[in-house]
Amino acid sequence: MDVQRYISSGILESYVFGMLPEAELGEIEMAVLHYPEIKAAVNSLQHDKEKFVMLYATPPPPGIKDRLLEIIQQENTQEGNDLLPEELRTPVPTPAKETPVKKLPAAKKSTDRIWKYATAAIVALLFGSVIMNFFFFNRSTDYKSRYRSLIAAQEKLDAQKEQHALTSIKEPTKEPDLLTDPAFKWMKMDGVGAFTGNSVSVGWNPQTQVVYLLAQLMPVPPAGKQFQLWAIVNKKLVDAGVFDGGAEVSQKLQQMKAIAIAQGFAVTLERKGGSTSPTMSQICMSAKVTR
């Protein structure tokens, strides 16, 4: 290392006056330990620094020592706080002012009047409660009476229905006695040809236009066939409906189609379900309306 050049670089002055960064302090301290010339230069600079400080130092004002001692002794008192400069004083909290409380005049007591009103209200409520209870009790009694009456009526109606059902089971339903009804004109038609020995009875009511047929002696028609009744109206055959034959229906009145006018009736054997026009070769029987 060139010691003289290092000393004259000005780095030692910066070190002595505390102007070097911390990263370079270690380098100066190592140089002071290894190089006596650098150590001597540093000592000389420090001596010059002290002389400079002493040359320009300002003596303290008289009495400062006594004042400082007094401040230290009264540090925690208000007097000591007042001796400090204003910027160093501890702020003293300002005591809160007491707000005078204005007493309001005492409210006039009205306890007696309040109790009177309360008592009157309670009495009114009790009286109303008694009236309502009496009213609802009467209504409840009335409803119970009506309910019992309805139950009794329902039981009576159920008993009547049950009795009627039992009677209906015991007594078979009877056909209306149309055979003796004078409003009906009955005529018996006897079979011809292949149906000789067969017969049907037809009853017609000109007023109501109702027609009944009793196939008391008619066989069961062949498969795919059915008997059909025709009304003779002005020498023309008008469809009066189909009917069944056989022992099962021999005693049963079969209602046919309504006929308004008829001079007679005829029966033919048609295809099952009937025909819109009669098959004349299949006429089984016919008869005129009796007057």
Image: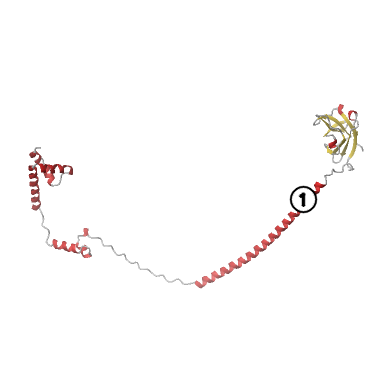
Q: Quadrant of residue 146?
A: bottom right
Toward the right, the furthest residue is: 291
Tally of marks: 1
Give how far across and how far down residue 171 sits, in percent.
83, 47
Among all residues in the image, which is located at the extreme bottom?
112
On the image, the x and y values in percent for residue 134 come to 65, 65
For the residue pair 166 and 183, the one nearer the viewer reads as: 166
Residue range in magenta is 158-162
Could you tell me which quadrant the C terminus lies in?
top right
Is residue 285 something one can see in this rendering?
Answer: yes
Pointer 1 residue: 162
**Is residue 262 or residue 228 the one in the foreground?**
228
Residue at 9% in and 53% down: 54
* Majority SS type along the magenta span: helix
- Vertical arrangement, residue 75 with respect to residue 105, above or below: above
On the rendered structure, is 278 left or right of 32?
right
3 magenta-colored: no
Which residue ends up furthest to the top in the rendered image?
Answer: 281
Image quarter for residue 260?
top right
Task: Please say whether residue 259 is visible from this viewpoint.
Answer: no
The spot of residue 26 in percent (x, y) is 15, 43
Confirm whether the magenta stretch covers residue 159: yes
Out of 13 and 120, give the one closest to the viewer: 13
- What's under tag 1, amino acid-wise? Glu
Crowd band around label 1 with a 10 angstrom C-alpha radius: few (<14), some (14–19), many (20+): few
Q: Position of residue 117 (x, y in %)?
A: 54, 70
Quadrant of the snapshot with the N terminus: top left
The image shows residue 6, relative to residue 131, as above or below, that is above
Query: 263 left or right of 94?
Result: right
**Mark 1 secondary-structure assignment:** helix
Which residue does the image show at 18% across and 44% down from the upper left?
Answer: 22
Structure colour scheme: secondary structure
